[in-house]
Image (cartoon, rainbow, N blue to C red):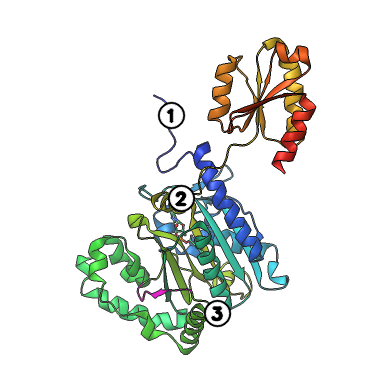
Amino acid sequence: MSIKAPRGTRDILPLEAQKWYILEEIFKKMCCIYNMHEIRTPLFEETELFVRSVGEESDVVNKEMYNFKDRGGRELALRPEGTAGVVRAYIEHGLYNMPQPVKLFYYGPMFRYDRPQAGRQRQFYQMGIEIFGTREPIADVEVIKFTADFFSSLGFRNLQLHINSVGCPQCRFPYQDDLKEFAREKLSMLCADCQRRALLNPLRLLDCKEEGCRELMKDSPQLESYLCQDCRDHFNGVLELLNVLNVPYYVDPYMVRGLDYYTNTAFEFISEDIGAQGSLGGGGRYDNLVEICGGPSVPGVGLAMGVERIALAMDREQLWPEESEPEGVFMAVQDSGLKEEALSMLYSLREKGLRADTDFLNRSLKAQMKFANRNGFRYVIIFGEEEKLKNQIKLRDMLKGEQLELSFAEALDILVKERS
Ligand code: HAM
């Protein structure tokens, strides 16, 4: 039996990778415009980091984490998300001593053992940003506006921004008690997970994926009326700035998000087009997380977007740019005795920074032309006995169907000028 990619993982083949490249370029450009700096953290961390930050009772840690013991007996986990590792690095390297805010971005694979379906995988890629060191609503709005700008540069016009405030631990206590009370009557009808959540972490009752539980919790108390003045002011501050910047939003009073570290703002960008896994990106504020992870009391806010989901939505909405024009030069050799000379021409083309390739399989000229065409080369240089005798080459423009006979040096000149 042949070995297949593990369930929930995908190979990104060259044609798809080209599309991802577009997303990566736009993301990095946006980060540069917003003055964000890249951070790269390990793919695995001590399990304890995620237990403390994401939360022991969250699905992500409780059910979906890939944890393992290494040969030295250390308890490690493949990162299920990026924020915890970035927070750990922020503390470990004393980034709180730098001028604040510190604005970071990252891009890479995350791992969650969830039931795979379209837009949900066990290894998936996230692009994320985190801003440390300010509690001002302007920072929340910076993250949201970044995301809105990123999506609009990709061509999305109808994503919905859902936003809520999950308050601070102080205003959450009485709310959680009331939520528990509300759930008590329905306890026997809730799923086994929710029965446990009702005891240990009632807020999680609001993001159960079971339809039955969602229905039962539909009219539960709303956190909004429990917010303390500080949290209320903060949320209003965020909404006012969104109004000023003309960023449309929908206040979703039941959105709590699946990770325990959020305080105040929580938000998601949702696409109606890709079904159940419609959240293309989500984030929020986490003012206690740095402290929870062993650092000083530094607030933070950030977001992460799922690359597979964005790509899927781009497919559905046909947002990918037209295929790029053919470019570069294919060196076609008519006689295998001329390979060496052709190679030196090939490398001269590359030295000039031109995309260039040649035949590796001693194919006929016709087959080489076909290969060049299929591989998106704009030009073919044809070099055979006849050309060698005349100390020339043929330069064929595959787009225009025109052909010139000239020296290689002249051809090189034309190609370099053409590119610039
Ligand atoms: P999250 O909502 O768990 O938040 O994930 C962010 C995004 O990652 C989701 O909106 C979705 O697009 C994508 N995603 C999540 N799980 C999967 C999956 N199994 N397959 C494919 N895509 C997935 C976080 O991870 C937070 N760290 C975001 C954040 C940053 N909050 C503050 N800073």
| Residue at the spot 36% in from the left edge and 48% down from the top edge | 118
Residue tagged by mark 3? 137
Mark 2 or mark 1, which has the lower sequence index? 1
Q: Nearer the viewer, mark 1 or mark 3?
A: 3
Residue tagged by mark 2? 311
Residue tagged by mark 1? 3
Which of the two residues, 130 or 375, is positioned nearer the viewer here? 375
Chief secondary structure of the magenta portion:
loop
Q: Using the numbered discs, state the Cα–Cα distance from disc 1 to disc 3 in whole angstroms.
A: 50 Å
Task: Using the image, determine if residue 331 lies above or below residue 351.
Answer: above
Region rendered in magenta? 247-254
Mark 2 or mark 3, which has the lower sequence index? 3
Name the kind of residue labelled 1 in the image: Ile
Mark 1 or mark 3, which has the lower sequence index? 1
Residue 38: % across, % down: 65, 58
| Residue at the spot 40% in from the left edge and 40% down from the top edge | 7
Which of the two residues, 208 or 154, is positioned nearer the viewer here? 154
Q: Secondary structure at mark 1?
A: loop
Pointer 1 local density, CA inside 10 Å: few below 14, some 14–19, many at least 20? few
Tell me if label 2 and label 1 are in contact, CB under 8 Å: no
Q: Using the numbered discs, state the Cα–Cα distance from disc 2 to disc 3 in whole angstroms.
A: 30 Å
Quadrant in which residue 167 is drawn: bottom left
User: On residue 320, which mark appears?
Assistant: none
